[in-house]
Amino acid sequence: MRVIGSREFNQDVSAAKRLARLEPVFVTDRGRPTHVLMSIQAFRQLSGQRESIVDLLALPAASDAQLAPAERWDGSKG
């Protein structure tokens, strides 16, 4: 577990995000913990949550997929 002050967090959010990939990062305000930053994988493991359809659709590979033209309800193309 890593602890950083809110000023340090505000000055370099990217560094805090990099640290959070490895372990939870506690952010303090005047020496008292106020927030915890962690990777989404760590959060899901902690909460027992799985990927949602929204997460899967947001994957970069999903946007590159070649989709067939939409079909109308009556079965015709277009």
Image (cartoon, helix red, strand yellow):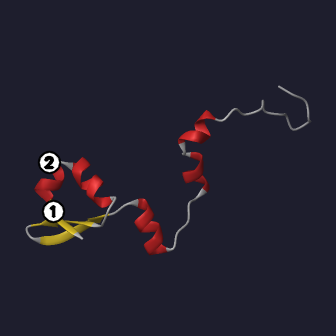
- x and y percentages locating residue 3 in the rendered image: 17, 67
> Which image quarter: residue 23?
bottom left
Q: Residue furthest top?
A: 78
User: Marks 1/2: CA distance?
Assistant: 11 Å
- x and y percentages locating residue 13 in the rendered image: 23, 50
Position of residue 78 in the picture relative to residue 21 (left or right): right
- x and y percentages locating residue 4 in the rendered image: 15, 62
Q: What residue is at 61 percent from the left and 54 percent from the top?
A: 53
Quadrant housing the C terminus: top right
Quadrant housing the N terminus: bottom left
> Which image quarter: residue 68?
top right
SS class, disc 1: strand
Please report whichever mark, 1 or 2, sits nearer to the chain's N-terminal start: 1
Q: What residue is at 22 percent from the left and 51 percent from the top?
A: 15
Q: What residue is at 54 percent from the left and 45 percent from the top?
A: 58
Position of residue 23 in the picture relative to residue 27 (left or right): right
Q: Callout 1: 10 Å neighbours few (<14), some, many (20+)?
A: some
Query: Which residue is labeled 2 in the image?
Result: 11
Q: What residue is at 59 percent from the left and 36 percent from the top?
A: 63
Tell me the kind of residue under disc 2. Answer: Gln
SS class, disc 2: helix
Tag of residue 69: none
- x and y percentages locating residue 62 in the rendered image: 61, 41
Tell me the kind of residue under disc 1. Answer: Ile
Position of residue 32 in the picture relative to residue 64 (left or right): left
Query: Which residue is labeled 1 in the image?
Result: 4
In the image, residue 57 sits, relative to residue 71, either above or below, namely: below
Q: How many numbered dots are placed on residues in this image? A: 2
In the image, residue 38 sits, relative to residue 78, either above or below, namely: below
Q: Residue furthest left?
A: 30
